[in-house]
Image: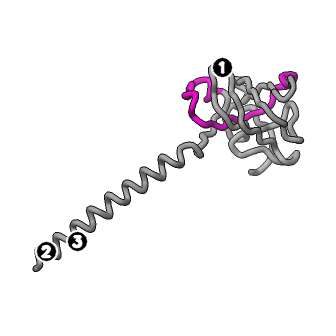
Amino acid sequence: MRSTRKARRIQMLVFGGVLLVAASALFGFLAQDAIAFFMSPADLLARAPSPDQLLRVGGLVVDGSVSSQGPVNRFELTDGAASVAVVFEGVLPDLFKEGQGLIAEGYMKGEVFEATEVLAKHDENYMPKEVADALREQGHFHGDQQN
């Protein structure tokens, strides 16, 4: 009787472990489309991610780089070390302007970052932490904001 009880406990532990691994794998598979890695333009150009990897790239909008043709907007983002061309089809946020910090979410297609969403700063005293950190690393962030 004792060995049967012990065998049942082991079976339950093994079953619980298999169930935990299966649930973790399912969660990871389902969440992979929602996970976006943040990169600076220099990191993005140095790493060359796969075209199907969702990314966020942040930096400052390069002065004189903004152009629009109908709903398609083109601009460049820089972290001071490198610049990446961004294409966004849609309406840009009201606070979008040259020289301001922003984050674009989308996919790298060749040499162009195709944004699906553009997030602009919300007031003159705020810059997204990731953008400020990337610019600070490059030595191009001169703000005294505390994020």
Q: Which residue is mark 1?
A: 111
The local secondary structure at tag 3 comes to: helix
Residue type at numbered disc 3: Arg
Q: Which residue is mark 3?
A: 9
Assess whether mark 1 and mark 2 are in contact (beta carbons under 8 angstroms): no
The local secondary structure at tag 1 comes to: loop
- For the point 68% across and 27% down, the residue is 113
| Residue with the most extreme top position | 111
Residue type at numbered disc 1: Glu
Q: Nearer the viewer, mark 1 or mark 3?
A: 3
Residue 85, image quadrant: top right
Q: Residues within 10 Å of mark 1 (few under 14, many from 20)?
A: few
Residue 10 among magenta residues: no
Q: Position of residue 40 (x, y in %)?
A: 66, 33
Residue type at numbered disc 2: Thr
Residue 98, image quadrant: top right
Residue 116, image quadrant: top right
Q: Is residue 18 above or below residue 90?
A: below
- For the point 83% across and 22% down, the residue is 65
Assess whether mark 3 and mark 1 are in contact (beta carbons under 8 angstroms): no
Q: CA distance from mark 1 to mark 3?
A: 57 Å
The local secondary structure at tag 2 comes to: helix
Q: Which residues are magenta?
A: 42-66
